[in-house]
Image: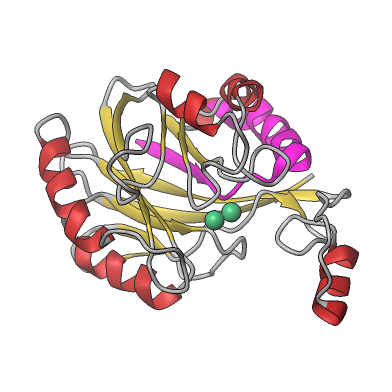
Amino acid sequence: MKILCIGDIVARPGRDIVFSYLDSHRYDYDLIIANGENAAHGRGITMPVYEELKRAGIDAVTMGNHTWGCGDGAKVLEYNDDIIRPLNFDKGCPGEGSMVIKARNGVNVGIINLIGRVYMQPADSPFTMVEAEIEKLKKKTDIIIVDFHAEATSEKIAMGFFLDSKVSAVFGTHTHVQTADERILPGGTGYMTDLGMTGVIDSVLGMDKDIIVKKFLDNMPSKFEVAQGKSRLCGCVFEIDEKTAKTVSVERICYTE
Ligand SMILES: [Fe+2]
Ligand SMILES: [Fe+2]
């Protein structure tokens, strides 16, 4: 089975290119997972934006440090079971850190969302917490995909090796810059350090480049605006053998209209 994983979708330009790509490629995949932490104006998600992602063809949404970036985040997570936030967030927060979803070919797929701790806000250990969650999901399916939303490449690579042979695939999100290290780890787990960003190319992580450059020059308070212009969709396709739950091929995606 083929699972498309789409990197951080940034605002309207990101959502538009998702529509455009999936319009012709939606049925190439058995399951489509996307990181939606920047989907609403670059920070967080709202109910209308979540519904738009679903209409575009996205089956499951993962989040990250911007989960609560706009007022609607908690509501979206509470009312929908195909969107998750990092598992190692504080226990009392809304939503779940994993899900099991039925793919188009009828196979159940488990998805776990984790957040890193290197150069990020305090969180429980993703390494400790993911093990118990895998055991829980394995009662329902052997095919498990992990979105590790983290800054440091070292932490993400370590997670890849830690989970090698325990899950079907591990990919990273959050840096908005695609890495070219897609591979199959020795134990059969598909891996890629960061899927990259789905948003405007000539931008700083999806935001207006001139405002960000000015911020680096004067360090004055400023309102970041979403960049406008030509976009690209970044992600990765993991082809997974349903019998062994191992990845058999990994293909990096970088689509521009
Ligand atoms: Fe992001
Ligand atoms: Fe992030």
Task: Please identify the quadrant where the C terminus is shown.
Answer: top right
Residue found at x 29% / y 73% = 158
- Count numbered badges in the picture: 0
Judged from the image, the quadrant occupied by ligand 1 is: bottom right
Which one is in front, 37 or 239?
Answer: 37
Where residue 6 sits, quadrant-wise, is top right
User: Would residue 92 be counted in the magenta stretch?
Assistant: no
Q: Is residue 23 above or below residue 228?
A: above
Question: In the rendering, at what x and y percent does residue 38 appear?
Answer: 63, 45
Residue found at x 35% / y 25% = 103
Residue 185 visible? The answer is: no
Which one is in front, 219 or 138?
Answer: 219
Question: In the rendering, at what x and y percent does residue 210 appear?
Answer: 90, 66
Relative horizontal placement of residue 95, taking residue 212 as reference (left or right)? left
Give the dominant element type of the magenta stretch: helix, strand or loop: helix
Question: In the rendering, at what x and y percent does residue 129 appear?
Answer: 20, 54
Where residue 139 sits, quadrant-wise, is top left
Question: In the rendering, at what x and y percent does residue 109 appear?
Answer: 28, 33
Relative horizontal placement of residue 218, taking residue 175 as reference (left or right)? right
User: Would residue 7 be counted in the magenta stretch?
Assistant: yes
Relative horizontal placement of residue 162, taking residue 239 as reference (left or right)? left
What residue range appears in magenta?
1-26
Which one is in front, 217 or 185?
Answer: 217
User: How are the colours assigned in the image?
Assistant: secondary structure
Q: Is residue 252 above or below residue 13?
A: below
Residue farthest toward the bottom in the current orientation of the protein: 217
Residue 46 visible? The answer is: yes
Residue found at x 32% / y 26% = 101
Q: Is residue 30 above or below residue 106?
A: below
Task: Please identify the quadrant where the N terminus is shown.
Answer: top left
Residue found at x 67% / y 26% = 23
